[in-house]
Amino acid sequence: MKFYLLSLISCALIVVSCSNNESTKKVVYESSITELTDHQYPDNFQIESRSYLWNKYDHSLFQVIRNDSLDFTIRILPENEFSDTIFLEHINLLLWIPTIPTHILKDNYLKDIGIINAEWNRQQVHFKKGEFRLSRDNQEAEKVSCVDLARNCLNSYTWELITFTEEGGQTKSMYHGWFDFPKELYRELFNEVNFGKLTFQEYRHHLEHYEDPTKEIIQLGVLRAVETQKKMEFSDFRMHPYPLTAARKLKFKNIVCPVNPTVINDMLTDSTTYSTFQWPGFYDTSDPRPSTLSMLGIPKSVVVRKTISKNSQKDTCYEFDLSFARNTDTNYITRVVIGGIIPTDLEQMPIEEYNNGIKKPMGIGNHGFYENIDYAIGHQSTESPYYGFILDDKGMWVDSHFFGVDGPILHLDDQDPNLLHFWLLSFERHAMVAHLTFPLE
């Protein structure tokens, strides 16, 4: 089995197929796949929970064939005698390509923030049985229960493939490969999906090299019209622990500082650090990522607005505008504004199941961190009413990644359908750094 960290090479081949005596040429784009050993990736948060079959299967190449404008075939080629070819067929790869909602085009700064955050946030799409197939030449096909294809948050080309199997009634990761999406095709698809909006070349430095945008005022009025607004009483749970379930349980070991936090408030300091996400897409505690989470130290106010999105559907939505004082300087106010939340998308659930709530990255119109393929198809960015920002007291944009926040989780109380649980995920979703409840009406 191969283990290496070389620059991945992308290339394009020409495949000729014949049908009814006619020759049709299709370009096959491909990239080498990298796998990482536990020595190379000691902070892998899935080590303790993965399948006993880990390291048995091996794959060499990621291939893309375009069949039609919105129809693509992906092939993941095997590398050893146990592995099969994985096929994702008749998928619209443009769903993974960063874009922005059409209704923000009138504001150049929102265009900048929208497209940059779309690239800087993870989009992992889940394929269930019946939505993928394997060649069944060897043994792997009998074990794979689902396949995930992820565009990670490092730059325009870093992608991942993860397969899972069922063991003892649990879904466990079985294979993980990293690869560069073929660059020529990526740029082509980017320009295609953003035709008439923006070009890859305009944003190349941001998308390839993580160059920060300027800090300017966010014009919320471009995104929505306010129908009503009300300041709400709220309950603050920063002195409470959060449930160590799902990813928070697995990623707890990647909280570098504080050591063994017990309540949310333990992390609301500027000494808090988390594992850094490094190329090609792994967590590294040896290079901790700093934060400025003292700015979430003291919740001061909550405003709930009913809004009408400026998208073509004119969706009726909620906007939540929360103000926090810095616990080292209470005169310093930071706002967290989450909007474009469609009321019927909010579900009731106990806090132990909070990870199943609406879970979104900061930005404009972004896909979720994790989605099923059918949800991704039905919730495309171009018409999404969603937005999430961290703003200073002047309404200027703050980079949420350097702040130390990835996005919200939202759900209704399991006993009270008018009570919202508002959570904030830390950098790389390692921990929860806010939990408030407040009424919607």
Image (cartoon, rainbow, N blue to C red):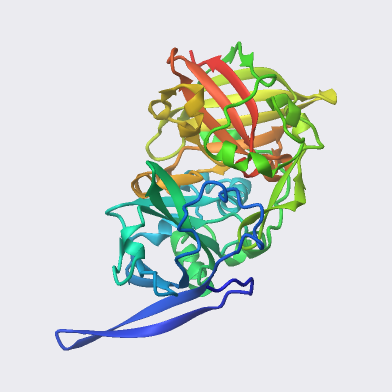
- Up-down relation of residue 32 to residue 214 (above or below): below
Give 23 or 414, whichever is nearer the viewer. 414
| Res 217 → quadrant | top right
Residue 393 seen by the camera? no
Q: Tell me the quarter of the picture where residue 243 sits.
A: top right
Residue 146, given in percent of the width and then of the height, sits at 37, 53
Residue at 57% of width from left, 54% of height from top?
119
Residue 182 relative to residue 429: left or right: left
Q: Residue furthest left?
A: 20
Between 84 and 68, the residue placed more toward the observer is 84
Residue 161 horizontal/vertical position (percent): 47, 60
Residue at the location (30% across, 52% down)?
129
Give the percent coordinates (x, y) of residue 253: 67, 42
Q: Is residue 370 left or right of residue 286?
A: left
Looking at the image, the residue that sits furthest to the top is 233
Q: Nearer the viewer, residue 54 or 370?
A: 54
Residue at point 27%, 54% (across, down):
130
Across and down, in percent, residue 251 comes to 61, 42
